[in-house]
Every structure is written in C-alpha cells, then in structure tokens.
Image (tube, rainbow, N blue to C red):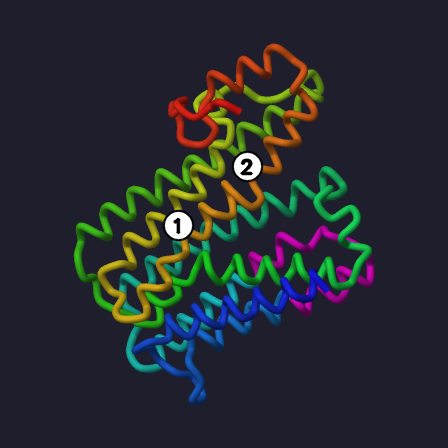
Amino acid sequence: MRDIFISIISVLIACAFAWAGSYGGPSFAEFPALMLIAGTGFIIHWIIFLPSFFFITEKFYDITGTIAYFVMVGLAVYIASESRSLSILSKIIAVMVLVWALRLGLFLLIRVFRVGEDKRFSEAKKSFFKFLMFFSLSALWVFLTTANALTLILNNPDINGFIFLGIGGIIWIIGFLFEVIADEQKRQFRRKDSNHGHFITTGLWSMSRHPNYFGEILIWIGMAVISFPVLSGWQYATLISPLFVILMLTRVSGINLLEKSADKKWGNLDEYQTYKSTTATLIPFNKSKNKN
C-alpha cells in the first residue's frame, strides 16, 4: 500500500504544480499545456516500466528520464510555436535542458550496462508496485526539475532582462562543467584496476565529496534565475525546481545514501576519516559542517 500511495502522491504533486504553472499559459486541445506535458512524462515512464518489470531489468530506468525530457521539451516547443515563432530565449532554454539531459542520460546508461546492475533496484525490480513507485518518482523528478524551464518555453517570451540571462547562464555553465568533469574524473578513476575498492580524492573530488551533485544543483538554480523575470502569478510556484533538487539530493536520496554506503565501506579507514573531515560534503571548500 505504501508504494501505491507514493505513486499516487507523485501524480498529485505533479498535477498541482502543473496547474500552477499553467496560469496565463497556452492550452492545447482545450487542455492546459503544462498539465498535458506533465501527464506525458508520467505515461512515458509507465510505458517503459512495463517491459522493465516483465524482464526484471533496471537498465532502462535512467534513459527513460532522458526520453521523457526530450519528448516534454519537444511538446513545449511545438505548442509554443503554434501561436508565433519560437523566441530566442525559449530556444536557448530548450537547448540547455536537452544538452544536459542527453549527456547525463547516456552517461548513466553506459554506466549501468558496464557495471551490470544498479543495486538500488536489486529487490524493487521484483515487486510490481515498488518498481512502479520508482518510475513514478522519476517522472515526478523529470517534471519538477524542468517545471520553470517548460513554463518559460510555453510563455515563449522575448529576452526580458539580460542580467538574469547572463547571471543564470553563468551559473548553469559552471554547474554543467562541475557535473561533467566530476563524472569523467570518477569514471577515469574507476577504470584503473589499482583503484578497485578505493575512493576518489583527486580533482574536483578533493574540494567536495559530491561535486557532481553540486553541479546538478547549480544547473537548476541557473535555470530558475533565467526563468524568473518571465514568470507571473501562480507560475512562480514552478521555481520549486531547484529547491526540489536540493531537497532530493541532500535530504532524501543522493548524498544521504552515498554517505551511508561510503561509511559502511571505508568508515574504519583512517585515510577515509581524514578525507571526510577535511573535504566539504557538497559546496567546495565549505568544511564548516563536516561533523558527521
């Protein structure tokens, strides 16, 4: 029952923010466009869930999100273009989301095929409703992370405030570079047999124990900054995007799970305790809260 409840709540939360983001926005076939796009994201996840459960595989879980990002952004672009040509700002935002989604989706897909499995789903993939819950939560993640970006595309505005575009763009670029470089550094580290069973402490990982997540958070903060001046009324609720990412990565999954796993693997090693006490958890060089 818990798994079914979480899936239902995921849909309701998405509906609530889609309704808010639809304020003053366009409709498609007399249906609020953002709600239609949010629903499409869930349908994509549920369709791919069925064969994934049937074949008891999690290998298509992460790429499902990438497919949903592309379809949802594509729908937003199509609907926005019906009334007038797509604005430069909408094009910029669409490209930013798709570049990020394609890079991360392929990275995760290649990783899971190389490793062979994603241990998060070892038991879940054997249970229909538990596995469905994970796919539903992924659909909620995809929609809430892009909610303000999709709203901006649907509003199809001209550039209104180069300051917001400039600042947000710089934040986004820094975040993207942090995520890409951190992922690549860890990939290269794991490729060496001599590093098997060890933890990485070099490159960006010498400044933060989770630099890829720091980059992820900056990406969505940057997107929100760019979107801010073109939102209105209830649409401001879609600015939950970066807050949702921060909550999920720092309090729900992400860092919490990885820290527990790392403590279990290396908690008895002096070098790991030294690394943990001298390296920021998330924000590079911010060591003030490294008490755990």
Q: Is residue 237 above or below residue 182?
A: below
Which secondary structure class fits the magenta region best?
helix
Q: Position of residue 27 (x, y in %)?
A: 39, 83
Let me know if residue 74 is in the magenta part: no
In-front residue for pair 150/91? 150
**Label of residue 255 in the image:** 2
Distance, label 2 to label 1, CA atoms, is 17 Å
Upstream in sequence: badge 2 or badge 1: 1
Let me know if residue 54 is in the magenta part: yes
Describe residue 252's horizontal placement relative to residue 161 as left or right.
Answer: right
The stretch in magenta equals 46-67
In-front residue for pair 32/269? 269
Mark 1: which amino acid? Trp
Q: Position of residue 234 (x, y in %)?
A: 32, 70
Describe residue 49's horizontal placement relative to residue 284 as left or right.
Answer: right
**Label of residue 220 in the image:** 1
- Give the quarter of the figure containing the N terminus: bottom right
Q: Position of residue 237 (x, y in %)?
A: 35, 64
Mark 2: which amino acid? Ile
- SS at badge 2: helix
Residue at 33%, 58% in the rendered image: 92
